[in-house]
Image (tube, grey):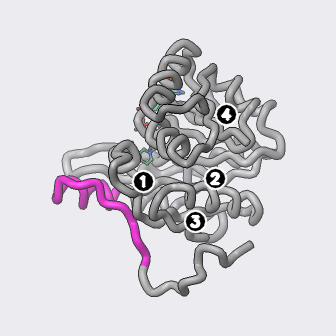
């Protein structure tokens, strides 16, 4: 199984890719520019001592990947969805996208008519199984492979099997627990919370993640 990363040569996509490679998971790095994607994949293979990364256009990797992760800015969502729509029928498509603006008082969530970027994506790709995840995992934490990731990853979606697949994927990362955060509608809270996390990170000059407490120990295997 290969995981496709649309926008995989960017900061968040690269971070997710290097952690997947660390877990010996094949990744397909996507970009609007195939050469940039190939160069990023070659660099990741060199760093990881692997041959499990390959690069191509966003369309090609989305077609070939079994799970497709969108790691592009909100501004590019509608155009990317238009290009990917015919390729996404029945696929698990993960939105990491956080619609944010940066004002004088810090980052704040941008209102999305559908409620969240993930719900907008589901509207734009009606036949895809859209899941929201990884909003609270910073690119910096992901890139620092000398350290475990060590956070919870809150995953939401309307398709239970798709959500389970993404929780399992997240749990390939060292120290990560996948948490079922409910239906896709929960994405509005996951996305907006990222603005708060960034404000905290700014204050402490840190890259804090999320760890929930007082959940049952079996939580990571609960909702199959
Ligand atoms: N950075 C983080 O710590 C972090 C954490 C959690 C979630 N996220 C979310 O992850 C997404 C990517 O964040 P990032 O920090 O990696 O951003 P980024 O580096 O600015 O962008 C990622 C990649 O998206 C592609 N891209 C840019 N504009 C595009 C457009 N209009 N249409 C299609 N593709 C476009 C570019 O790739 P090509 O030029 O190669 O096509 C770029 O390298 C965002 O939605 C962000 O909210 C980020």
State yes or no: Cβ of the residue under disc 1 lies below 8 Å from any atom of ligand 1: yes
- Secondary structure type for disc 4: helix
The residue that disc 2 covers is: 119
Label 1, label 2: how many angstroms apart (C-alpha)? 20 Å
57 relative to 99 in the view: left or right? right
The residue that disc 3 covers is: 186
Residue numbers of the magenta segment: 195-212
Structural crowding at the residue carrying mark 4, measured as other residues with C-alpha within 10 Å and reported as few (<14), some (14–19) or many (≥20): some
> Mark 1 and mark 4 in contact (Cβ < 8 Å)?
no
Visible in this render: residue 78? no
Give x and y (percent) for residue 203: 16, 58
- Secondary structure type for disc 1: loop
Label 3, label 2: how many angstroms apart (C-alpha)? 9 Å
Question: Magenta includes 151?
Answer: no
Question: Which of the two residues, 82 or 66, is positioned nearer the viewer here?
Answer: 66
Q: Earlier in the sequence, mark 3 or mark 2?
A: 2
Visible in this render: residue 95? yes
Q: Earlier in the sequence, mark 1 or mark 2?
A: 2
Q: Which mark is residue 137?
A: 1
Structural crowding at the residue carrying mark 3, measured as other residues with C-alpha within 10 Å and reported as few (<14), some (14–19) or many (≥20): many
Label 3, label 4: how many angstroms apart (C-alpha)? 21 Å
Tell me which residue sits at (72%, 63%) in the image.
Answer: 158
Q: Earlier in the sequence, mark 2 or mark 4?
A: 4
> Mark 4 and mark 3 in contact (Cβ < 8 Å)?
no
Tell me which residue sits at (40%, 47%) in the image.
Answer: 142
Residue 87's place in the image compared with 135, above or below, is above
């Amino acid at each position: 199984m290969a995981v496709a990363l649309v926008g995989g040569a960017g900061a968040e996509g690269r971070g997710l890719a290097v952690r997947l490679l660390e877990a010996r998971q094949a990744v397909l790095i996507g970009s609007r520019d195939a050469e940039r994607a190939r160069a990023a994949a070659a660099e990741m293979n060199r760093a990881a001592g692997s041959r499990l990364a390959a690069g191509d256009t966003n369309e090609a990797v989305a077609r070939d990947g079994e799970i497709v992760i969108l790691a592009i800015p909100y501004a590019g969502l509608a155009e990317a969805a238009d290009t990917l729509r015919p390729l996404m029928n029945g696929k698990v498509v993960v939105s990491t996208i956080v619609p944010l603006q940066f004002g004088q008082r810090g980052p704040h969530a941008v209102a999305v008519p559908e409620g969240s970027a993930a719900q907008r994506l589901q509207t734009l790709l009606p036949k895809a199984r859209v899941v929201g995840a990884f909003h609270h995992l910073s690119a910096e934490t992901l890139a620092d492979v000398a350290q475990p990731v060590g956070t919870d990853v809150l995953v939401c979606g309307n398709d239970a099997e798709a959500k389970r697949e993404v929780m399992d994927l997240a749990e390939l990362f060292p120290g990560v627990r996948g948490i079922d955060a409910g239906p896709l509608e929960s994405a509005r809270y996951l996305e907006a919370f990222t603005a708060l996390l960034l404000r905290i990170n700014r204050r402490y000059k840190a890259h804090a993640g999320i760890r929930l407490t007082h959940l049952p120990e079996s939580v990571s295997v609960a909702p199959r």
